[in-house]
Image (tube, helix red, strand yellow):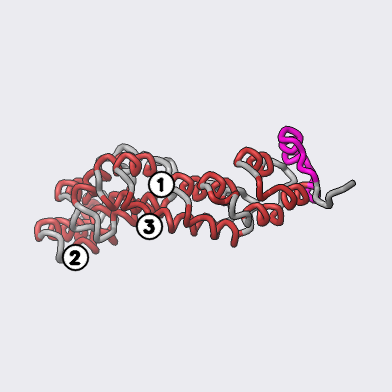
Amino acid sequence: MHSGAARRPDTETLLHRLRRAPTRQLLQLVDENGRDFTLRELRQALLNPYIDGEVLQVLGGHRKLMATREAKSAVARHRRTPEPVAMRLIPHLFWRDLTEITLDLRIRAPVRRVAERYLVQRLQRLAEGEKVNLARRSVDAVAVRLLSEGQPRVVDAGLENPRLSEKALLDVVTSERASPRLLDRIAHHPRWGSRYEVQAALCQNPKAPYRVIFKHLKRMHPDVLERVVANREHTDFLRRTARELLTDRTQPVAIGLESEDESISP
């Protein structure tokens, strides 16, 4: 005699089927048993290569299953999770989970951007050690915020971040929020301090240490020198030096005129 309800498979059988079942069978397993899943069973379903957005939507809709942060993170971080499901879960994640989402290029770009926004909002609540760890590997938008805070250990970690782009660093150097100490640290960094674009940005920022600007001024193109001359926030001496360099660069040079005159004289 049948009770009318599907009999739940034993745990090991269920785990095996969750990992290997085709999409339709997987959906049926999740429909029938999902509300009683543990994190172990959820993870097996997420490892199934045939899982699709419909199955993930059902999993993400089980309130009991989604009660833990680990379950929310696992579903939100899956590359096939529908955007509305992932975005509903993201506000409940820890900063480490948000970081992993921002770094995973397999996840849809809108989901990564939302995770990035929430991560930036959480930065003020992080301890210095957590910021150091985050600065070492974060995406540009997060790295810029961390660098701009100017904490020495965080800045040093951020400047070593292999994901940090020159464009993002230039946003830091040209920012009105940049402190002289931060600019000095950037100027003396082995990776960044030798780049012309970084040096040019430092020369144009009046907050950069005087010795840093003066050191690089002779190498600057005329357009940079013109900006230094025009910026009244720079010291008179720096502006005068830039003007003299600019004059030297723009003066016409007469080559060989004297020898030519001598050659035609009687």
Q: Which residues are magenta?
A: 7-25
Task: Read off the residue under disc 3.
Answer: 121
Answer above or below: position of 59 versus 38: below
Task: Decide whether the magenta segment is chiefly helix, strand or loop.
Answer: helix
Which residue is at a point 71% across and 42% down the rendered structure image? 48
Dot 2 or dot 3, earlier in sequence: 3
Q: Check residue 10 for magenta coloring.
A: yes
Q: Check residue 74 for magenta coloring.
A: no
Q: Quadrant of the C terminus?
A: bottom left
List x then y, in percent, for residue 226.
Answer: 24, 63
Extreme-front residue of the structure = 1
Give the SS element for disc 3: helix
Task: Read off the residue under disc 2.
Answer: 231
Disc 2/disc 3 C-alpha distance (Å): 34 Å
**Depth-wise, is mark 2 or mark 3 nearer the camera?**
3
User: Which mark identifies residue 164?
Assistant: 1
- Disc 1 crowd rating (10 Å Cα; few below 14, some 14-19, many 20+) is many
Residue 252 visible in the shown view: no
- Disc 3 crowd rating (10 Å Cα; few below 14, some 14-19, many 20+) is few
Which of the two residues, 156 or 230, is positioned nearer the viewer here? 156
Of the residues shown, which amino acid type is indicated by label 3?
Gln
**Depth-wise, is mark 1 or mark 2 nearer the camera?**
1
Dot 3 or dot 1, earlier in sequence: 3
Of the residues shown, which amino acid type is indicated by label 2?
Asn
Which residue is at a point 16% across and 58% down the rendered structure image? 244
Q: Would you say 86 lies left or right of 166 here?
A: right
Give the SS element for disc 2: loop
Which residue is at a point 43% across and 58% down the rendered structure image? 117
Which of the two residues, 144 or 256, is positioned nearer the viewer here? 144
Of the residues shown, which amino acid type is indicated by label 1?
Leu
